[in-house]
Image (tube, helix red, strand yellow):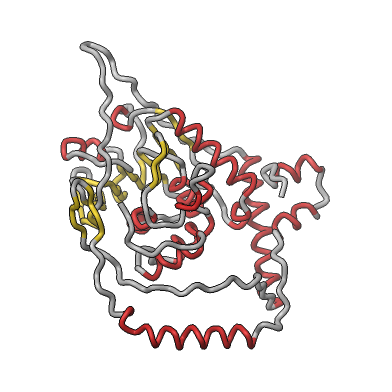
Amino acid sequence: MGGAVSAGEDNDDLIDNLKEAQYIRTEKVEQAFRAIDRGDYYLDGYRDSAYKDLAWKHGNIHLSAPCIYSEVMEALKLQPGLSFLNLGSGTGYLSTMVGLIIGPYGVNHGVELHKDVVEYARQKLDEFIKNSDSFDKFEFCEPAFVVGNCLEISTDSHQYDRIYCGAGVQKDHENYMKVLLKIGGILVMPIEDQLTQITRTGQSTWDSRNILAVSFAPLVQQSRGEGEKPDTVQLPPVTVRSLQDLSRIYIRRTLRNLTNQDSQGKGTVQRVPHKRKRRRCRRRRINTYVFVGNQLIPQMVESEEEEHAEEEQKEAAAEEEEERDIGDIEIIKQVNELREQILALPLPESLKAYLLYYREK
């Protein structure tokens, strides 16, 4: 599933293409996508495929196409402080992006059938926290993953503000998913080859709308012998953060705000080294799909923008001229200012390390 937008050279190019095709429509979703490099979730040797708008699978590890994830993120209408449940959480790529939006006062849980995939997701999460430059730019709600079948969740589990299911849901499982949702909450899941947004409007009332035609593998039902009890999935507990953890969040937020105010007051503009622009082929958003054999393939729609190639070439030439005009502006090396602020505090080294989440860079 995928292929709705042009391939990118890197993560930023991919996001640019998703924006042009109107799959990414809000700033907060764009920021989350740019902060998490999709290529970091691919196995070594497969990263070249990371910036194509295609699903990827290797063994039990699976990533949906970027256009699907962007539609899901937009449809969830995420806000700080919400609770989120990812059914079929996979590599943790989507859950990590969600964590950047719901922030430290949210709840971020995932259920994944395969133990090896949960271990992979925890490894990728640890790498993001320790190594990504984006971590210090956001307030983050760290995902918690558990192994289990999402059709066997304990009946006394708490409800969530937002839920996403990353596998095809049969009609007879639809109500099972709905009861996990709080009143006023949003559930996004594929039902009968349609990515669907469901809003719970009351105790027993829901509004539904179809978002996009999709093709997902169906949910796996647990097989068991006669009289055998199911392996009930216990979701992670919803816990109150410790005073120590709350203090760390507040100190980091205060320093980050002071740094931002200082930069605005000085009118500081950081320019990163120029990146070679590539010629773009702009397309309209694709909403038409056809079956070829047993595969669902996007049917390319003729784009009016492509008829104006000459105008685009003139615009590109104007952009290059503008870049030459500002080429003498000093390029400032990007610095992790939050880290520098923390290291400059008159505190014991052990406390500084805690404030930095023990990051080494």
* Viewer-closest of 328 and 359: 328
Q: Which of 303 and 137 is in front in this view?
A: 303
150 left or right of 128 in image:
left
Q: Quarter of the image holding residue 74?
A: bottom left
Q: Residue furthest left?
A: 172
To which quarter of the image does residue 159 belong?
top left
Q: In the shown orientation, is residue 357 left or right of residue 46?
A: right
Q: Which residue is drawn at 30% across and 42% down?
A: 181
Q: Is residue 345 in view?
A: yes
Counting from the top left corner in percent of width and height, residue 257 is at: 64, 63
Q: In percent of the image, x 21 and y 62: which residue is there?
A: 288
Q: Vertically, is 254 above or below 181? A: below
The answer to whether 156 is drawn above or below residue 253 in the figure is above
Counting labels gives 0
Percent position of residue 118, x then y: 46, 33
Residue occupying the point 25% across, 48% down? 215
Query: Can residue 73 be seen at all in this image of the molecule?
Result: no
Q: Residue at x 33, y 27 (%)?
A: 154
Closer to us: 259 or 6: 6
Does residue 305 lie above or below 215 as drawn? below
Residue 348 place in picture, x, y as percent: 82, 43
Which x, y percent locates residue 173? Answer: 21, 36
